[in-house]
Image (cartoon, rainbow, N blue to C red):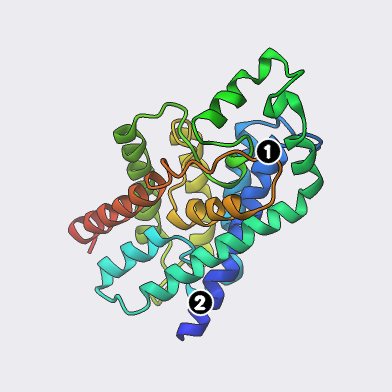
Amino acid sequence: MSSSDIFIGETIGTAILILLGGGVCAAVTLKASKARNAGWLAITFGWGFAVLTAVYTTAPLSGAHLNPAVTLAIAIKDGDWKNVPVYWAGQVLGAMIGAALVWIAYYGQFHAHLTDREIVGGPGAQATTAKAVEAQEKGAGPVLGVFSTGPEVRVAWQNVATEIIGTVVLVLAVLTQGLNDKGNGLGTLGALITALVVVSIGLSLGGPTGYAINPARDLGPRIVHALLPLPNKGGSDWGYAWVPVVGPLIGGAIAAGIYNVAFA
């Protein structure tokens, strides 16, 4: 694979991943969405199908890493680091594009949600807004969850540990079951397996932090949230932003180490 193929494939694939994954978060969260309050099952399966679609679409171009933690793990496993910056650049750019497309697709819903006093607080707001207002005071705006993850209980070491554990599970599944014949990415069967693993992680380990398990998936959309002209959007919670970047990268490195010791 050429560097251009890798960059284009990772950009397109990660954009599809975030468009569909962030899209299900928007569908469940935003006022005036037909799927509002559909719940955690909808989110976990939506993200799983997003992974399946993105990987299947772009595997021929780049191997469909779509996740800096996966790229890091494969580099550690193979000892080949030359294309890591290209993968990472495509992944972050693709995540930003996907997040912007979510905003376009749900433009009216974002506006309705963020101009509703029961959502954002203010004069005439009801007592039920307390949680949303409290979240804004802590730095997380009322629609940040459409773009990026955040903890239910903010305990830094636990939040990092949760992301590490979830990412180890994901990356081990990629390394042991999802590599194609060339060893450089996910094959067709690997796409399905990995999608189901993502659903499993969401159902079992997603409760504490929202299971980023992918630095680009969190960082790119968080940057877009900070840049978009959303009314009453609140903060982008940059104080937490390091957790879904550092945790998954550590998890990817640990998974690669486990693979090299136990499976290589």
**Quarter containing the N terminus:** bottom left
Q: CA distance from mark 1 to mark 2?
A: 35 Å
**Residue 170 or 71: which is nearer the viewer?**
71
Residue 253 sits in which quadrant? bottom left
Label annotation for residue 14: none
Q: Dot 2 corresponds to which residue?
A: 7
Residue 87 at x, y = what percent?
44, 71
For the image, the number of numbered tags is 2
Helix, strand or loop at label 1? It is loop
Residue 174 sits in which quadrant? bottom left
Residue 12 sits in which quadrant? bottom right
Q: Earlier in the sequence, mark 1 or mark 2?
A: 2
Q: Left of 152 or right of it: where is 41?
A: right
Q: Residues within 10 Å of mark 1 (few under 14, many from 20)?
A: some
**Quarter containing the C terminus:** bottom left
Identify the residue at image location x=50%, y=65%.
91
Identify the residue at image location x=20%, y=55%.
262
Residue 232 at x, y = what percent?
68, 38
**Residue 101 or 253: which is nearer the viewer?**
101
Is residue 55 at least partly visible in the picture?
no
Residue 155 at x, y = what percent?
35, 29
Q: Residues within 10 Å of mark 2 (few under 14, many from 20)?
A: many
The amino acid sitting under disc 2 is: Phe
From the viewer's perspective, is the residue at label 1 or at label 2 nearer?
Answer: 1
Q: Dot 1 corresponds to which residue?
A: 232
Q: Left of 134 or right of it: where is 103?
A: right
Helix, strand or loop at label 2? It is helix
The amino acid sitting under disc 1 is: Asn
Is residue 121 at least partly visible in the picture?
yes
- Please say if 123 is above or below 247: above
Residue 51 at x, y = what percent?
56, 56
Hey, which residue is sitting farthest left in the picture? 261
